[in-house]
């Protein structure tokens, strides 16, 4: 195990050290084979702008950061084209490679994670190459179809959509999040960032189109609308984080009152989200599942009522009461359903599987039972898994249990991941 | 027809006719422009309508909408266009913004009529100003000189200032006539908005100039704005969901206790009344509303035998109650956004220095702030004027008298007076009406708990 990790780290460092050299060499090679219509100083300024843009993180809906260099990059084809000649893709790529080499220096100086730097550089270079190539290739076709006056914008639209699709594929392949995340989840969460991408590319192209007409005023024209969109995304993300924190704080109330194990809600939510990502649920459902798992024991708040304690209660009733509390908020109606159905058996004796029990509820049931087995009954992980396997006749969905096992294995909970006896 | 409706009719019809006159005059001056320009105007109008319709409430009072900028862009574009008529372009733009979604769902007539009038007249007047200022400029061609761009952008900024001032004046006049001198809260922050409008106008000037020489930028600008606007509206949706989650949560939990049912909502309402009376800003009002929502959550973690007990608590039980409540407050203070509200709701303890209850999550102060006093008064007022398991409610006057007599620094006379004034003004009374002050004073003084019920 240990030597493998060290090996991976060494590879990352080797690649990192080689990266700025090879990017710089590529930049020079591309530049010398290009038609060289643009001046070297102009190209250098563009590369510097790209590198600086790469340092500015941009908020997106999926929470994966993009950088402002997307915006700078989309201005390049407009800045470096003249009316009579076609676009010089090689010169553009030279600028981009030079910008990446510079960005590597800046980000390493800032102390960023090398793996992130490498992956993001590769992703953005391939994506931009696709953009530049499409920009050049699409031109004759678009000119044949679209009336003059609107051709440049149409070419941009075609090339930008191509760029985005390539970026989605690359960010699915080179995922930086936790391991054992299904590619469906990776891809869908990358698609969520289309609006932030479009805002960036739109602003960059705005600058590129406006610059020949009004000079440096184009910067104001491009930056101000983008700042508006940027602020809106930032507020959205902040509110989302606050919402999550509030739900977490509320879910701690039964734990503080002593009606539930301290930290149970947090651990259940963390495990449930890992299972959901492993199974490839949609990002929106994963968000709801996180809230539901966090609040799955909220019904226990009612345990401070003397009448309830006198009369006794079942788990199903607690789930029902919890779901009533959550259901007061229309926005959380699905979360309330997941909480209400968390104790439903996935299959009843003599019947097929019940398709009405939502998958998130089945996930919560498994994650919560695992955590209880470990913390309350003090079982080892293997014993806890055995209990879940035994319960998967009726109570625990075997598909979810299997997914939990894979998640735990990838974390090395059972010992060496590849050498389980 | 009552008096207010007569006034509404009068204002609505005068404003609407002024709007019609403006449109006719602008029409007589000349046509909108060449056919291609009409298409561009349509694009502007759609953007203007989308932005006005889906205007997003940010911080409650500030209706943020870049619609202003769209109108100014159109004005500058048509002023620079040979044969363009900026007056008609801007007046028509105002005319399409007459309905809001709220007007349609509530079948209002007065508001759309008045809005049609004031937006059209404002648009026409500002269009005329832009036309006069930009008259005689040489036809634009790419690249436009730096100074010229700056000049046009400044004209845009000036026109935007005129636009928002005129708009404000018309709205204030209408509100004064129809509703009397009542405070006009939704527009009270207009002054602070003016700077944003000037910036929008400057940008509008730049864009108008740019559009003349490069039409292709139009879809790009609209794209970026629409994306920003959609993100802003999903932000405000989420913010509402956040508040309604907490509200719903508190409501369901209160519903289980007959005596405190609705307590939180009423405290929030009293806080709002006092805050408005004392001239709080939108941010302050929002903060105090949240604080009111969470001020009683601590009791949720209180053991069953304590919460349901009839009669007084002994000191050990009281201590347990405090400890549990503090642990909940600490959990809530973990939420960055809620920390100031938690401090507001529980940062002040009226009973001298605290023993160590283990609370670390939030700051405690020696002297209560004004916001804490507002919450304290609202909380105590509701507690006194509603029944509890262990006592009957007391009358409004008695409650005020008791709070004034209490030496706690939470019960500030100005704050109490503000609540009294606010209740008088809207004509609401709380508690059983018949109990006289003397009678209430004979009763057992309210529990030592002070503000924290």
Image: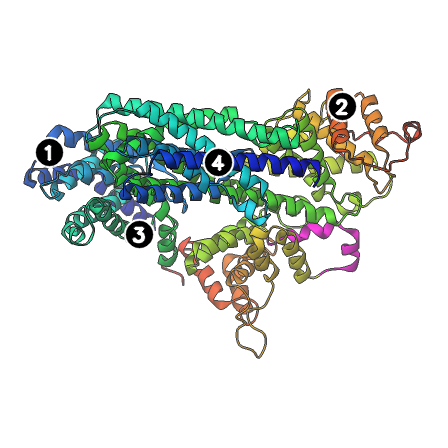
User: Do the numbered discs 4 and 3 sit on residues whose CB atoms are within 8 Å?
Assistant: no
Would residue A311 be counted in the magenta stretch? yes
Query: Which residue occupies the extreme front position in the image?
Result: B28
Q: Residue at x 77, y 31 (%)?
A: B380
Mark 3: secondary structure = helix
Q: Earlier in the sequence, mark 2 or mark 4?
A: 4
Mark 3 vs mark 2: in front: 2
Spot occupied by residue A54 in the image (x, y as percentages of width and height): 28, 36
Q: Which quadrant of the view contains residue B218?
A: top left
Horizontal side, residue A56 vs residue A370: left or right: left
Spot occupied by residue A103 in the image (x, y as percentages of width and height): 24, 34
Query: Distance from label 2 to label 1 (Cα)?
Result: 74 Å
Mark 2 vs mark 4: in front: 4
Query: Which residue occupies the extreme bottom position in the image?
Result: A350
Chain identity of mark 3: A
| Residue holding disc 2 | B417
Task: Please say whether residue B255 is visible from this viewpoint.
Answer: yes
| Residue holding disc 1 | A38
Q: Nearer the viewer, residue B246 or A100?
A: B246
Q: Nearer the viewer, residue B85 or A163?
A: B85
Task: Find residue B19 and name its label.
Answer: 4
How would you rate the neighbour count of disc 1 (Cα within 10 Å): few for under 14, some for 14-19, many for 20 or more? some
User: Do the numbered discs 3 and 2 sit on residues whose CB atoms are within 8 Å?
Assistant: no
Q: Main secondary structure of the magenta part?
A: helix
Chain identity of mark 2: B
Task: Please say whether residue B60 is visible from this viewpoint.
Answer: no
Q: Nearer the viewer, residue B176 or B231?
A: B176
| Residue holding disc 3 | A168
């Amino acid at each position: 195990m240990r030597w493998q990790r060290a090996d991976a780290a060494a590879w990352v460092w080797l690649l990192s050290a080689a990266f700025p050299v090879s990017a710089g060499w590529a930049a020079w090679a591309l530049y010398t084979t290009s038609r060289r219509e643009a001046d070297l100083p102009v190209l250098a300024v563009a590369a510097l702008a790209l590198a600086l843009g790469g340092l500015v993180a941009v908020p997106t809906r999926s929470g994966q950061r993009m950088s402002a260099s997307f915006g700078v990059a989309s201005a390049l084809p407009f800045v470096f084209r003249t009316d009579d000649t076609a676009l010089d893709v090689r010169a553009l790529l030279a600028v981009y490679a030079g910008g990446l080499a510079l960005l590597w220096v800046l980000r390493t100086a800032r102390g960023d994670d090398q793996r992130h730097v490498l992956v993001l550089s590769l992703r953005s270079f391939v994506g931009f190459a696709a953009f530049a190539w499409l920009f050049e290739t699409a031109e004759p076709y678009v000119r044949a179809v679209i009336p003059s006056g609107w051709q440049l914008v149409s070419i941009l639209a075609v090339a930008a959509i191509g760029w985005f699709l390539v970026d989605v594929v690359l960010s699915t392949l080179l995922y930086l999040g936790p391991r054992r995340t299904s590619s469906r989840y990776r891809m869908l969460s990358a698609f969520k960032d289309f609006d932030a991408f479009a805002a960036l590319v739109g602003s960059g192209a705005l600058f590129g189109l406006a610059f020949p007409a009004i000079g440096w005023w184009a910067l104001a024209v491009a930056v101000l609308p983008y700042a508006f969109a940027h602020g809106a995304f930032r507020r959205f993300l902040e509110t989302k984080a606050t919402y999550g924190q509030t739900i977490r704080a509320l879910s701690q109330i039964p734990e503080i009152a002593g009606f539930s194990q301290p930290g149970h809600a947090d651990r259940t939510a963390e495990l449930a989200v890992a299972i959901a990502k492993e199974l490839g649920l949609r990002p929106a459902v994963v968000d709801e599942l996180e809230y539901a798992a966090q609040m799955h024991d909220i019904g226990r708040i009612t345990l401070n009522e003397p009448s309830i304690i006198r009369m006794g209660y079942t788990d199903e009733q607690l789930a029902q009461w919890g779901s009533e509390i959550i259901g007061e908020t229309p926005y959380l109606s699905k979360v309330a359903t997941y909480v209400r159905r968390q104790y439903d058996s996935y299959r009843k004796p003599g019947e097929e599987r019940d398709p009405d029990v939502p998958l998130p509820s089945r996930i919560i049931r498994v994650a919560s039972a695992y955590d209880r087995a470990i913390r309350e009954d003090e079982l080892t992980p293997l014993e806890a898994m055995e209990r879940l396997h035994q319960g998967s006749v009726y109570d625990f969905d075997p598909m979810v249990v299997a997914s939990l096992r894979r998640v735990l294995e990838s974390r090395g909970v059972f010992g060496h991941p590849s050498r389980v006896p | 027809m009552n008096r207010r409706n007569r006034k509404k009719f009068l204002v609505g019809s005068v404003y609407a006719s002024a709007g019609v006159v403006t449109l006719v005059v602008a029409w007589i001056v000349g046509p909108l422009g060449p056919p291609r320009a009409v298409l561009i105007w349509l694009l502007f109008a759609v953007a203007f309508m989308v932005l006005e319709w889906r205007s997003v409430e940010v911080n409650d009072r500030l209706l943020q909408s870049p619609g202003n900028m769209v109108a100014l862009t159109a004005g500058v574009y048509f002023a620079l266009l040979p044969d363009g008529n900026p007056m008609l372009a801007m007046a028509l733009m105002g005319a399409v913004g007459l309905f809001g979604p709220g007007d349609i769902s509530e079948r209002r007539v007065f508001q759309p009529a008045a809005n049609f009038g004031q937006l059209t007249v404002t648009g026409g007047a500002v269009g005329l100003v832009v036309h006069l200022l930009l008259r005689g400029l040489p036809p634009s061609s790419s690249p436009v000189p730096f100074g010229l761009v700056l000049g046009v952008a400044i004209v845009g900024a000036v026109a935007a200032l005129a636009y928002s001032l005129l708009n404000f004046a018309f709205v204030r006049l209408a509100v004064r006539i129809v509703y009397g001198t009542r405070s006009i809260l939704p527009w009270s922050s207009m002054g602070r908005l003016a700077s944003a409008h000037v910036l929008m106008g400057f940008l509008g000037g730049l864009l108008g100039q740019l559009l003349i020489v490069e039409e292709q930028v139009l879809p790009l600008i609209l794209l970026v704005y629409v994306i920003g606007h959609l993100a802003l509206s999903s932000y405000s949706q989420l913010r509402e969901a956040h508040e309604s989650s907490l509200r719903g949560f508190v409501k369901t939990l209160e519903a289980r206790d007959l005596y405190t049912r609705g307590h939180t909502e009423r405290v929030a309402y009293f806080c709002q009344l006092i805050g408005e009376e004392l001239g709080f800003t939108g941010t302050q009002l929002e903060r105090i509303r949240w604080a009111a929502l969470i001020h009683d959550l601590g009791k949720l973690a209180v053991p069953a035998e304590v919460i349901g007990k009839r009669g007084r608590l002994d000191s050990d039980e009281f201590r347990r109650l405090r400890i549990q409540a503090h642990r909940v407050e600490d959990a809530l203070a973990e939420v960055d956004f809620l920390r100031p509200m938690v401090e507001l709701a529980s940062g002040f303890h009226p009973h001298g220095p605290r023993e160590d209850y283990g609370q670390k999550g939030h700051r405690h102060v020696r002297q209560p702030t004004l916001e804490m006093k507002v919450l304290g008064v609202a909380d105590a007022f509701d507690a006194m004027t509603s029944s509890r398991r262990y006592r009957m409610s007391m009358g409004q006057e008695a409650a005020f008298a008791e709070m004034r007599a209490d030496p706690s620094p939470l019960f500030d006379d100005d704050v109490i007076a503000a609540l009294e004034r606010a209740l008088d003004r809207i004509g609401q009374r709380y508690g059983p009406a018949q109990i006289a002050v003397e009678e209430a004073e004979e009763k057992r003084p309210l529990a030592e708990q002070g503000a924290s019920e």
